Image (cartoon, coloured by chain):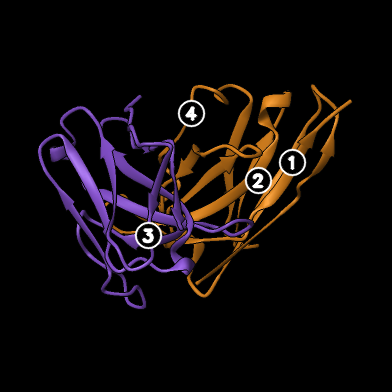
Chain colours: A purple, B orange
Amino acid sequence: SYVLSQPPSVSVAPGETATITCGGDNIGSYDVHWYQQSPGQAPVVVIFSNAVRPSGIPERFSGSRSWNTATLTISSAEAGDEADYYCQVWDRHSDHRAFGGGTKLTVL
Amino acid sequence: LQLVESGGGVVQPGRSLRLSCAVSGLSVSVTEIHWVRQSPDKGLEWVTFLSYDGQLKDYAESVRGRFTISRDNFKSTVDLQANGLRPEDAGVYYCARSGDSGVLDKWGRGTRIIVSS
């Protein structure tokens, strides 16, 4: 199965920029999606197809992808952005979905 | 579109549970549904999916041979029959709809399985 790697935790000061990375073999050939999950809540899509922001998601959230890394960037971080963030791809060979291990974002 | 899970509970190791995902606001027969679980204080783990036409399904290795996904078009539900439950199967089970490009763009609130003797 396809393996995605994320840092377990990222810290950012309020108002600064947080960067969360997601690595995988040849990840540049996959569409990468990002989810935000607050405690006790279901995941919510914040970025899909590498860089597309769903309606209702602030412009502070952006995504990018290179050949070996996908990145979620949260600019002007706010206390309300504290959550777990997961990257995910669709492994078309198997039709499975693969999730990264998740990154806990702390805004301190 | 709304997804609502039910059927979770406390079960002894080796026993079974049947989870259900009720789909409303869109016909279940045109909806690809996935089940994703989350063990306590752990990350998201993809479990299984059923294609919109009901023809394709597959499972994570961790549940293959024990879990079965199915659909009831009349009741508008996608069910997950979980047999031979193990302690490591405990957690919150979410159903989610797959949109274009494989994103899971709509999730239910989840239902919890506790496996304990």
Name the residue nearer the viewer: A26 or B3.
Answer: A26
Q: Residues within 10 Å of mark 1 (few under 14, many from 20)?
A: many
Q: Amino acid at mark 4?
A: Ala
Q: Chain of mark 3?
A: A
Mark in the foreground, 2 or 3: 3
Q: Secondary structure at mark 3?
A: loop
The quarter of the picture where the C terminus of chain B appears is top right
Mark 3 and mark 2 in contact (Cβ < 8 Å)? no
Q: Is residue B37 left or right of residue A95?
A: right
Name the residue nearer the viewer: B2 or A29.
Answer: A29
Identify the residue at horizontal 64%, vertical 54% (top origin).
B110
Mark in the foreground, 1 or 4: 1
Check the image and report above or below for A61 versus A7: below
How far, Cα to Cα, is label 4 from label 2? 16 Å
Mark in the foreground, 4 or 2: 2
Q: Chain of mark 1?
A: B
Q: Secondary structure at mark 1?
A: strand
